[in-house]
Amino acid sequence: MGAKGYIMQVQPFSVNDGDGIRSTVFMAGCPLRCRWCSNPEGFTATPVIGWYERKCIGCGACAEACPQGIGINLNAERERCIACGKCAGVCPADARARMVTLTDADDVLKEIQKHRLFYSYSGGGITFSGGEATSQTEFLDCMSREIYDMGYSMDIETCGMFDWNRVSHILARMDLIFMDLKIFDSEKHKEYTGVSNERILENIANLAVFGQQDTDIFEIADAEGRTGNDGHGPEIVIRIPVIGGVNDDDENIRASAEYVHRHLPHARMELLPYHRYGQIKYEALGMPYDHPEFRTPDKAEMERLRDIVRSEGVEIADFR
Ligand code: SF4
Ligand code: SF4
């Protein structure tokens, strides 16, 4: 195929990113900077090397291999790193690791095909995630076309910040679109994610074209008419990552659910509690992770917020 793109990871056996057992393709690059992001290595579509100090045994092999003369503590000299990956190649403890790699689409496809039996037995498939998968639009277009023609189910997780005219024909190929609506108030959205949310709200409304009239889908689809769900177009799930102390107020959840119901009467919503799983990656990148004010909502709080969503007429989806 020849196309190349920046990949964080192809994670097999994912069970929370759509139906069945899936391989999740994490693509680097994102226009948002959510303060709670658990994949900070994916902020930019560039190669990234991490140093996991907790795993390091201090052997010095990385420093000997480095063409830039960088020592064991990569994070003290990160600005000189050219991400050549030589240190990761010699580290005996996996303490130096390639966190984002320029990868051939063919290699991604080979990796995906290793697990094809799991997809067919479980009703699973492939999920594109990130970072923000749509930020490498041509690479995503190319890979999703190939995977569609291989006959695998495809889902995508997106922050919703993209150019609809460039991306909609790719979305039409999916069986399921997960799109985030992190905070309904635009000013607050900008404060916590770095961007205002007008385009995201617009793209949520644009999704109305799916799941209603098949003819509209074929107008959006590519010239070969690749459309998910056997021509019926993708299902839609709008997701809220619930960050205690930021967006867990009733007003935010209610306004979000009301907007979703008004524009996408067939869509479901999924509410996911905040977690700190990404903390170790911040350490590997030498980035601060210091948000004591962010809280993980407990089960009772999550269920209360889901009830608010239901009260607005929106069905709850649960892939956990
Ligand atoms: S990736 Fe290359 S330049 Fe960067 S620390 Fe490792 S060996 Fe040195
Ligand atoms: S090669 Fe790996 S284990 Fe050895 S000093 Fe470097 S990072 Fe640590």
Image: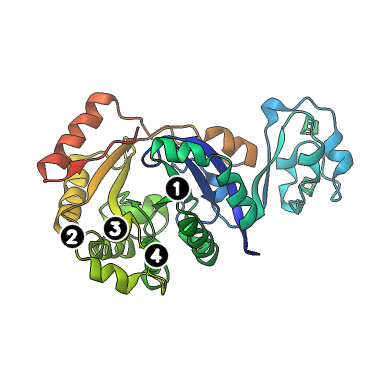
Q: Is residue 313 left or right of residue 291?
A: left
Residue under numbered circle 4:
226
Q: From what the image shows, is residue 194 above or below residue 64?
A: below
Residue 280 at x, y percent in the picture: 57, 33
Q: Report the image quarter containing ligand 2.
A: top right
160 or 124, nearer to the observer:
124
Q: Which residue lies at the image location 20% right of the left edge and 53% below the top edge?
A: 260
Residue under numbered circle 3:
186
**Amino acid beneath label 3:** Ser
The circle on residue 127 is 1
User: Label 2, label 1: how many angstroms apart (C-alpha)?
Assistant: 25 Å
The circle on residue 263 is 2
Badge 2 element: helix
Q: Which residue lies at the image location 15% right of the left edge and 51% below the top edge?
A: 258
Label 3 beta carbon within 8 A of ligand 1 = no
* Marked residue nearer the N-terminal end (2 or 1): 1
Q: Residues within 10 Å of mark 4 (few under 14, many from 20)?
A: many
Which is more foreground, mark 3 or mark 2? 2
